[in-house]
Amino acid sequence: MPTVDDILEHIGEFNLFQKQTFFILSLLSVTFTSIYVGIVFLGFTPDHRCLNPGVSELSKRCGWSLEEELNYTVPGLGITGDTFISQCRRFDVDWNQTALSCTDPLANFTSNKSHIPLTTCQYGWVYDTPGSSIVTEFNLVCADAWKLDLFQSIVNVGFFIGSMGIGYIADRFGRKLCLLITIFITAVSGVLMALSPSYTWMLIFRFIQGLVSKSGWLIAYILITEFVGLKYRRTVGICFQMTFTIGLLILAGVAYALPFWRWLQLTVSLPYFCFLLYYWCLPESPRWLISQNKNAKAMKIIKHIARKNQKSLPTSLQSLKPDEEASEKMNPSFLDLVRTPQIRKHTLILMYNWFTSSVLYQGLIMHMGLAGGNIYLDFFYSALVEFPAAFIIIFTIDRIGRRYPWAASNMVAGAACLISAFLPNDLMWLKVTVACLGRMGITMAYEMVCLVNAELYPTFIRNLGVMVCSSMCDIGGIVTPFLVYRLTDIWHELPLVVFDKEKVKRKSFTSKSRNQKLHITKKKGNYSQL
């Protein structure tokens, strides 16, 4: 009996219908970037110092410049490698005294500046930024700096929980229904996050957004790969991930235009309401319908695709029957991911690669946000190197397979992190070049694990397999913020050394999956072609 791939060869493997579907689903991928790495702008930490009551008035009376005001009133300035005192401590003195000198105000308290006691920033902070972020609004600095780590970790906790539940629902009840539900919840929670009156409420809505947003992106990825034919599946999957890179470029521009975090959050959330129009634009996956023994509905959608592509469907291909165990409806379960030795091996390898790729990819982006300089340009330029990574995959993956480019990209990423950590700042051009190579390497690794993950599972557990394996990337995302932000307090380049250990030490035991057909059935306790 004909398979979906056989039929697509006649009605169009990547014609008008598939191109339109790819375009509308890629919009979802573009907007997902703000949720995944938006912390770079939403959680930007500018230079800051303790707010000292009376200092502003004293500065105006004395006619100080900003530099003079800081030198007179902020402790710890000029201490190399230690910003804690200048950012989190203040002189425990009363700056409202009228007798303070304009040339040496601290002389009124003691002859030795180092003997003046220090205290915490009990009156708040002053931030050197024209805009705002969740850090500046909720004072997520000093003793509360860990709350910024939690802000990014909690969305990954949502990713993790959502991957388990929604992956099962999508395989059990269909891609389209699940996609629409995730879009609606993502839109509502994103808007509510922008309106949050407190840090706690913001965290709650951030968690809800995490529960559904990544699952929606992965369902869209699964849908587009199931709509296209075998020859185009690989290229379409990679191009779909490239739209995420386009989202990075757009996010940098939007964040530059809207330096206030609430307006930025609202702007990137509103497009999700437009995606609810997918109800009328997208059909259900015919592959999923066949796996559920709903062949009549699948054939109706196939005929719609043929009409859209202006192709005729031969009579011999207008009937579909379930393969092998036709009479039994296939309901996925978590045990199916480890039921046979081969698929168990695939599952374990993919889970490990998802974890390491996530830690390094998110970690490099967060570390870049702490490097100083123009955060918008740095973010934009670093995103550009992801395009060569995608093109390298497209031109090499079918010529030499998946395994060697996958292993090489991991090795390059790890080695680049280690080299970059020990390059002096005097060789900034070399440091930037090496950092770009690292970003390119981890982008290749990340895109390939997503591509291969969808190829190695049969249809009836494909969505579940991708969701469960990618959940390990969420575990990596949970620990990455604490890893990056806390280690940089010890040594700015220390996270890069840790990233190198995670990547270089791994062995390439990944499986080849070269031009495999998307599997639909299971057979006698084993999986067909697995």
Image: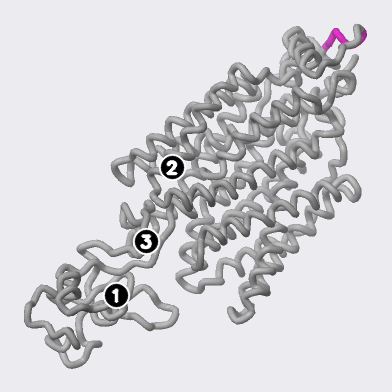
Amino acid type indicated by mark 3: Thr
Relative to residue 20, is residue 449 depicted above or below?
Answer: below
Q: Quadrant of the C terminus?
A: top right
Q: Indicate which disc residue 129 carries.
A: 3
* Tag in front: 2 or 1: 1
| Mark earlier in primary sequence (3, 1) | 1
Question: SS at mark 2?
Answer: helix
Amino acid type indicated by mark 2: Gln
Q: Position of residue 66 (x, y in %)?
A: 29, 75
- Tell me, yes or no, if residue 335 can be seen here: no
| Mark earlier in primary sequence (3, 2) | 3
* Residue where numbered disc 2 is placed: 265
Mark-to-mark CA distance, 2 and 1? 32 Å
Q: Start and end of the magenta stretch?
A: 316-321
* Residue at the farthest left position: 98
Asked if labels 1 and 2 touch by Cβ distance under 8 angstroms, the answer is no
Question: SS at mark 3?
Answer: loop
Mark-to-mark CA distance, 3 and 2? 18 Å
Q: Position of residue 289 (x, y in %)?
A: 72, 16
Relative to residue 447, is residue 308 depicted above or below?
Answer: above
Task: Confirm whether the magenta stretch covers residue 186.
Answer: no
* Residue where numbered disc 1 is placed: 66
- Number of numbered labels in the structure image: 3
Q: Main secondary structure of the magenta part?
A: loop
Relative to residue 5, is residue 250 depicted above or below?
Answer: below
